[in-house]
Amino acid sequence: MTPTAPPTPAQLMDQLAQAAAGYYRSFAAVAAERGLTLMQGKMLSLLRRPMPMRTLADLLACDASNVTGIVDRLEARGLVSRETAPADRRIKNVTLTEEGEDTVRQIRAELMSSLTGLEGLDEEERITFQRLLARVFPAA
């Protein structure tokens, strides 16, 4: 048997891009089943704690005015609320409502059921995968 050459960084980048595209296709489909756009679903999934709108704009890599529109639509559906930051009344924090938390749980559960490869990793492989992701994306 001939040993396989290790992948080049460019090949790894291509494989990562394909994996990310597949993940976001699944995410967009699951979000759409709940009447959400991809960006609305992404915003909900980022809100593990109250977060300023400026921070959300940075995390979503979009303009603050876009975040305002997304928050407006999510707030109208009862999935998020805006609260004034205690330390600075000029800052509005976005917080998941109970319904928003339920929606995020449903999205994550459905994604996990479609990403069975993650469930197939044993404990050591999950730890290694997490370490590798942290090395490739240290800011995440």
Image: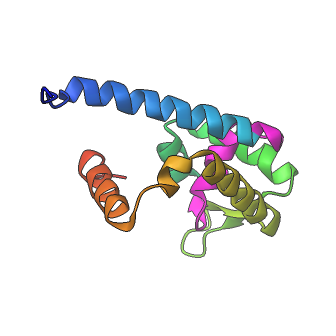
Residue 63 is drawn in which quadrant? top right
Residue 19 x/y as whole percent:
45, 33
On screen, 115 above or below 17? below
Of the pair 95 and 1, the residue shown nearer to us? 1
What residue appears at the point 76 percent right and 57 percent down from the top-left corner? 103
Magenta stretch: give its range: 32-52
What residue appears at the point 60 percent right and 75 percent down from the top-left corner? 86
Residue 2 x/y as whole percent:
13, 26
Of the pair 20 and 65, the residue shown nearer to us? 20
Q: How many marks?
A: 0
Left or right, 140 with respect to 42, comes to left
Residue 25 is drawn in which quadrant? top right
On screen, 140 above or below 5? below
Residue 134 x/y as whole percent:
29, 54
What residue appears at the point 77 percent right and 37 percent down from the top-left corner? 32
Residue 132 x/y as whole percent:
27, 51
Residue 4 is drawn in which quadrant? top left
Of the pair 71 and 119, the residue shown nearer to us? 119
Is residue 91 something one can see in this rendering?
no
